[in-house]
Each structure stands twice: as C-alpha cells, then as structure tokens.
Amino acid sequence: MNEIMDGLNGMHPFTSAILLWFENNGRELPWRGIGDPYAIWLSEVILQQTRVKQGWDYWERFMRRWPSVEKLAQATEDEVLREWQGLGYYSRARNLHHAARQVVERGGFPRTLEGLRQLKGVGEYTAAAIASFAFGQQVAVVDGNVYRVLARHFGLHTPINSTEGKKDFALLAQQLLPEKRAADFNQAMMDFGAVMCMPKAPGCGVCPLKETCWAWSENKVETLPVKLKKLKVKERKMTYVYVACKGETAMHRRGEGDIWQGLWEPWLLEGDEASTVLENGLGKDKAAGRMTLLAKEVKHVLTHRVIKADFYYYEVEEKPRMPEGYRWIPENHIDGYAVPRLVEIFLQMIGEWRNTFHDKGATLMIKK
C-alpha cells in the first residue's frame, strides 16, 4: 500500500487512463453536470442499494413532485414514504425527509464535509459526493464500485468492510485525485466499476487498464475485493390476513424497533398467534366469515433476514374487533398508504384473485 502511494506525483497513469475512458464512455445521467446539491443529494440517497435504471425513475418522480429541498421539507412523512414505495430500505426515505427540513432550517445546504455529515442519513460517501459534484471540493468518493476497481487494479487484499480497509482505500482514492478534476474522476471511477469492472463477468478482455491490472495478470479478478464474512441470515415467518368488510379493510402502522418502521400493513400474525387464529377463527364474539389461503411461504429477502410469508384473505359481513392500533380504511384509499414491498405483492395478489379466481380459491370456512 505504501509503495503504491509513494509514487503518486502529479497525475498517476491510472488516473489519466480512467479519465480518458470516462470522456468516451461516461454515462449520461440527469443529475450530472447541473451543480444542484438537492438533485445530487437526492440521486445519491436513491441509488444506495438501488440500480441506476430503477433509481432514475424514482429520481424523476421526486423531482417532479418536489423540485426543491424546500418543497420536500413541506411534505409529510407519509407522502414521502408513499412516493418511495418499492425502493426498500425505508429508513433512507425517512432520513431524506428529516434532512430536507434540516437544510431548510439552516438556510441551505452546508458546503463542507463536516457540515454535510450532520444531515440525517448523510455518511462519508454521500457527503463526499455532494461536496465533490455540487461544490467542486477536492474530495474522493468511495463506493462499492471504487473499492472493486482499486482492489483489483492495485492488488489490495485488505477487507473493504473492515476499519483498516475503509481507511486505506479512502486514502488511496484521495491521492489518485487529479487537481481541479475531482468530480470527473469520482464519476469516472463509479461508471468504470458499474459498466466495465463489474462484480461478475467484468469486461477484462476490452479493459483499457488490463495491462497494469494486478488481478488480471494474476488471474485473481473473481477473488477481489475481499470482504469479511457477514452475520448469518435469519429466517422469519410472517402471516398476513387481509380482513375485508363491505369495502373497508383493517390496517395498522408499524412502530419503531423493527423492519419497515412507519409503513402500513394488514393484520399481521406471528408465532403461536398465527396458528391459533387460523385454527379457531376470530372467536365466538366475532363475525363469521370466509378465509381463503392465497399463497404459502412467499419468500422475501432482506439484508440480514429472509421472510417467508403466508397470505390469507378474510371476508366478513360484520367488522371484527381488531387488535389495538388497527384502523378501518376504505379499500379504494389504500394507494394513499405507504406499504412494504411484501405487502404490495400481497395487495396485487388480492386484486388478481378477486378479478379472476374469487370463487375458485381454496377456502376455509370460519364459523362463530
């Protein structure tokens, strides 16, 4: 590592080659080259854990509805979550909304790394991106693409998700920055990693840097970058029951301390409660109805857990007494509520079943 950095005088050959590649192959993205910190910040938040193709549509949708940070700050959290629906990692949306209000309160975006890091949800990477792309600061942006390109080209084996690795890669990226062209270099590195030096099936055969690439020469492309092993993924069983009564359904908002905070969902049963309710119905004091199993063990993968969900449709003539926190809402208003992707799949399934198989599903009659 030290040997690499000792030779960085002026513009490193690696830097020159990356910039030349970028001039001919850089992606045209709507938030580039406009210098608007709001548009840049919005794009960076959306593109965390999201592919550019999908994120692009969401960015345009947000910009149309809230074209400035002031407009976004005036929105409600529910409105922002609803617009975010489908992107996942909903803490990003909540942090985005909170940070927008922080920016408005202070009279504009901070122009320093330290000031940007004080915004809710803005870490090292996002702060560096805004500082570089919006304010022209000489600071390196280090994301997954940058880690991968540097690890392969320079043969770095320090785990990228270790404290030492983050420090070493950030230092190398910073020293590779060309004077007065930090934004170009940062964008070039991200694009090169996204379209050339990809995680799987990279374009090594046509790569302009292959002659100086350590991983290519040593046939180690697939082994870099190195990552520490993550925690074991846990499995979670969830049972959703959509209770329908004369054009209304029961929903509740998820609280803090669990996944999907602040999002809405139908009746959720977990653990022993699920088997008890499904075996015995809603109790003698509840309305009789018809319960239909729509799907069994629908797999939904999150970062540190795998959810397997059962979906039931429960149709009643009288509203049963629901657990605390549930409210009855008109079914034609559900689109106004932000729901997790798993619940969105459930709701779509209900719509399709109602239109096609309402009288053909496997049903379980629930009696008083």
Image: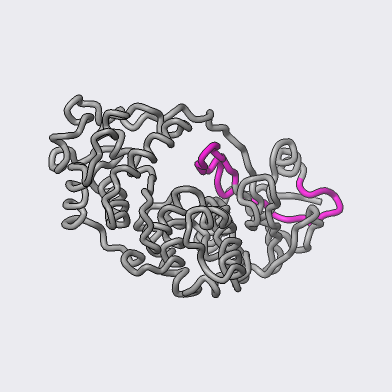
Left or right placement of residue 147 versus residue 154 in this view: right
Q: Residue furthest top?
A: 218
On whether residue 154 falls in the magenta region, the answer is no
Q: Is residue 58 left or right of residue 100?
A: left
> Where's residue 10, x and y in %?
22, 45
Name which residue lies at 60% across and 64% down. Answer: 102
Closer to us: 356 or 59: 59
Q: Residue at x 18, y 48 (%)?
A: 16
- Report the magenta stretch's main SS: strand
Q: How many marks?
A: 0
Provide residue 147's location: percent of width, then percent of height.
35, 39
User: Is residue 299 at all visible to an observer of this figure?
Assistant: no
**Foreground of the two, 361 or 21:** 21
Please tell me in which quadrant of the rendered image residue 214 appears.
top left
**Which quarter shows the N terminus?**
top left
Looking at the image, is 254 positioned above or below residue 234?
below
Position in image of residue 92 (x %, y %): 54, 54
Which sits in the foreground, 107 or 237? 107
Q: Is residue 270 above or below residue 59?
A: above
Magenta stretch in the rendered image: 281-310
Residue at position x 40%, y 55% in the image: 129
Q: Which residue is at 69% across, 49% downward? A: 256
**294 part of magenta stretch:** yes
